[in-house]
Image: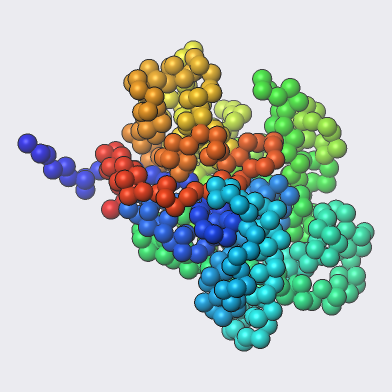
Amino acid sequence: MEQNFDYKHINKNRKSAIIMHISSLWNEYGIGNLGKEAYEFADFLKASGQYYWQILPTGPTGYGDSPYQSFSSFAGNPYFIDFRILEEEGLLNREDYENLDYGNDPNRVDFGKIYLTRKEVLSKAFENFKNIEDEKYNIFITENSDWIHDYSLFMALKEHFGNISWEDFPQEIKDRNLEELDKYEILLKDKINYQKFIQYKFFSQYKKWKEYVNSLGIKIIGDMPIYVSPDSLEVWKDRELFLDNIVGGCPPDGFSAGGQKWGNPVYAWEKHMETGFKWWINRIEKTMKYIDVLRIDHFRGFESYWAVPKFDEDARNGKWVKAPGVELFEAIEKALGKIDIVAEDLGYTTVEVVKFREKTGFPGMKMLQFAFNPENESDFLPHQIERNWAVYTGTHDSDTVKTWFDRANPIEVEFAKKYLHLTDPKDYVKGFIRAAWSSVANLAVAQMQDFLELGDEGRMNTPSTLGNWSWRVRKEMLTKELSKEIYDLTKTYFRLND
């Protein structure tokens, strides 16, 4: 006899998410963008019963193409502007962007090719925009006056000087001599206005896309790196908020004798405290205008950070330095109210870091790929996880689940099979995802690549290497059968967004 379950009387906090960066969406133009495919993927998530769409940072990227190394914390990525929408607005003709060289592999972004091709097309759109009176543009510029002009000048200067780092600008420009900057304001007026136009179009398209996603009852989980890029507007403009000769990193461990030296400038926290954390409040406020939940990368760095001398070869001479911790987030909450935050607290953890996260009340992260050491009852094992956590099958920095089963320590793989009661290789990936969805954690998250059961070809990033961030999905992969499979899994474990 069929039993009709009442799904109404359940823990309403049980939800799930799929990670899919905008760049990974399919289309004919070299890289995923905010066009119709972004709307279609939202429909796929809705049909799959998901509460959240998790994306990576959306700022403009440079060398290495990492979304975690952006030219600004406030600006948007011009790669995500959809040409078809610009055509609908009368800013482009179809022949302006069709049949151009965006790369030949539908599974990969060719960043070298799209950089040149897209710049040419967007420049045509800008030339046409000059002839239009657009009051919404004027409103956008006014609403973003605290950063848009400085950013546009910064990017125009970078282009003018051959796309070099601001640290290699002529000394007077590097030091923001106002008299010299005024000269370049005149010289580069058109390039400055081009950058403003790009940001206007990015945020116009992004806002409409987010409104559609939210109309389906789906929320956006955005991602924010704790540190800004050394070659960014913020470091050039607000140098007093960063330490001159210290960069972030991680101490030596069993995997790296020299530790990790990231190169990102660390914060001059005393200066931030003197201003009541004004810069941070502004950063969070602007970020939350375009997302619903914020995942903060390297959250432990707010409790203490590994400070590395800037010119050292590696991180072994670094030291732990205390950061403001709870005081920062109390100031943010006082200014902005409660914000939904997921704390990425993976990596080197201490009792102090645990207490800090617990004081904030933010859910931390548990990654199942770290769980299966049979010699140690890991806190990441499903039976150890408590409600106020986000459990991930993997992240953009990790192997896909399929690759993990293929290449991880055989002892750990065998333990995972035993723990998850997996005997048939075709069930390995599904069983791993099921472990996340069936856990008591309020939030369960998997990459789209894991639902597609992809191997190395689906990995988004291998840290400390080049040639990353290029994976793309093909439309034919997102079948109705897969959507129903995800829906059924999500319903079974009471995470359904219905």
Residue 161 higher or lower than 491, as above or below: below
| Figure disc tally | 0
Residue 361 higher or lower than 346, as above or below: below
**Residue lying at the far left of the rendered structure:** 1
- In the displayed structure, does residue 206 sit left or right of residue 489? right
- Percent across and percent down for residue 189 are 79, 76
- In the displayed structure, does residue 133 sit left or right of residue 362? right
**Residue lying at the far right of the rendered structure:** 171
Q: Nearer the viewer, residue 259 or 329?
A: 259
In percent of the image, x 74 and y 55: which residue is there? 232
- In the displayed structure, does residue 311 sit left or right of residue 152? right
Q: Is residue 321 visible?
A: no
- Percent across and percent down for residue 37 are 46, 60
In percent of the image, x 47 and y 41: which residue is there? 449
Q: Is residue 90 visible?
A: yes
**Residue lying at the far top of the rendered structure:** 375
Q: Nearer the viewer, residue 232 or 18?
A: 18
Snapshot quadrant of residue 298: top right
Snapshot quadrant of residue 300: top right
Q: Quadrant of the N terminus?
A: top left
